Amino acid sequence: MAAAEGSGAGGAAKPLFAGLSDVSISEDIPVEGEITVPVGSRSPDEDYSTLDEPVRDTIMRDLKAVGKKFVHVMYPKKSSALLRDWDLWGPLVLCVSLALMLQGGSADSKDDGGPQFAEVFVIIWFGAVVITLNSKLLGGTISFFQSLCVLGYCVLPLTVAMLVCRLVLLAGSGTVSFVVRLVVVIAMFGWSTLASTAFLADSQPPNRKALVVYPIFLFYFVISWMILTFTPQ
């Protein structure tokens, strides 16, 4: 009994991890990772979060982003601005504005023109979705919402054409008025088509670009035709 207690006391005095002192890591085993802690202070931009900013600053920042995209569409060139920071606020505003201006344009209809709003809204968004799916099936490298963003923002020239046509129709609806509206719509139709292809051209395979441009041509042609044939009640 005493011997057992003596052996137990001797065992307690022995270090718990005494055997680990003989363990060594071979130099052939690669050791990866970084265990050092940076001492330098972090910049204010790294600690900045949009969750902490006022609502007014958030709205102004989004409005500035939408305005910059409008400028890119009005001066089309090969750029990734619309693809890099995509959003659907601009296309939504353009779609609603165009639908409101086209509302009530059916001269032979007895209602208040309400269906025209839904008609324009569905044509624009459904057409953009179909073109986007076509682009993806042909091997496009941009995402679904990036394509919707580009197609929606490029409706801006046609929205301007609709505004000009409405102003021209206030002066009269004769032959001169039709010629002016025709020239404006054709010019803005070409502008919208060229702007959208300038942004989307590099995202398509070289041997399939024509298959992507043709639906875009039809998409903006339908919208242009709706604008040209618009007659107020």
Image (spheres, rainbow, N blue to C red):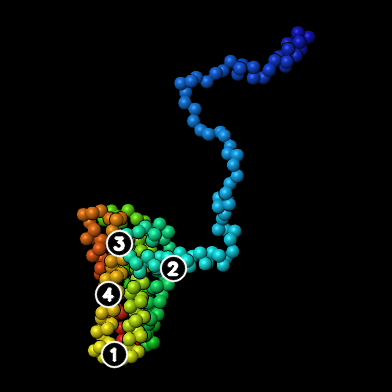
Residue that mark 2 sits on: 67
Occupied quadrant, residue 164: bottom left
Q: Residues within 10 Å of mark 3 (few under 14, many from 20)?
A: some
Give the left or right position of residue 68, taking residue 215 as reference. right
Q: Secondary structure at mark 2?
A: helix
Q: Mark 2 is on which residue type?
A: Gly
Q: Secondary structure at mark 3?
A: helix
Please tell me which residue lies in front, 226 or 36. 36
Q: Position of residue 142 (x, y in %)?
A: 34, 55
Residue that mark 3 sits on: 198
Quadrant (top left/top right/bottom left/bottom right) for the N terminus:
top right
Q: Nearer the viewer, mark 3 or mark 1?
A: 3
Q: Position of residue 178 (x, y in %)?
A: 26, 85
Quadrant (top left/top right/bottom left/bottom right) for the C terminus:
bottom left
What's the residue at 58%, 52% (across, down)?
44
Numbered tag placed on residue 187 in the rendering: 4
Residue that mark 1 sits on: 173
Q: Mark 4 is on which residue type?
A: Ala
Query: Looking at the image, is mark 2 or mark 3 earlier in the sequence?
Result: 2
Q: Position of residue 204 (x, y in %)?
A: 28, 55
What's the residue at 57%, 58% (across, down)?
51
Query: Looking at the image, is mark 3 or mark 1 earlier in the sequence?
Result: 1
Question: Distance from label 2 to label 1 (Cα)?
Answer: 33 Å
Is residue 15 visible in the rendered image? The answer is: yes
Query: Looking at the image, is mark 4 or mark 2 earlier in the sequence?
Result: 2
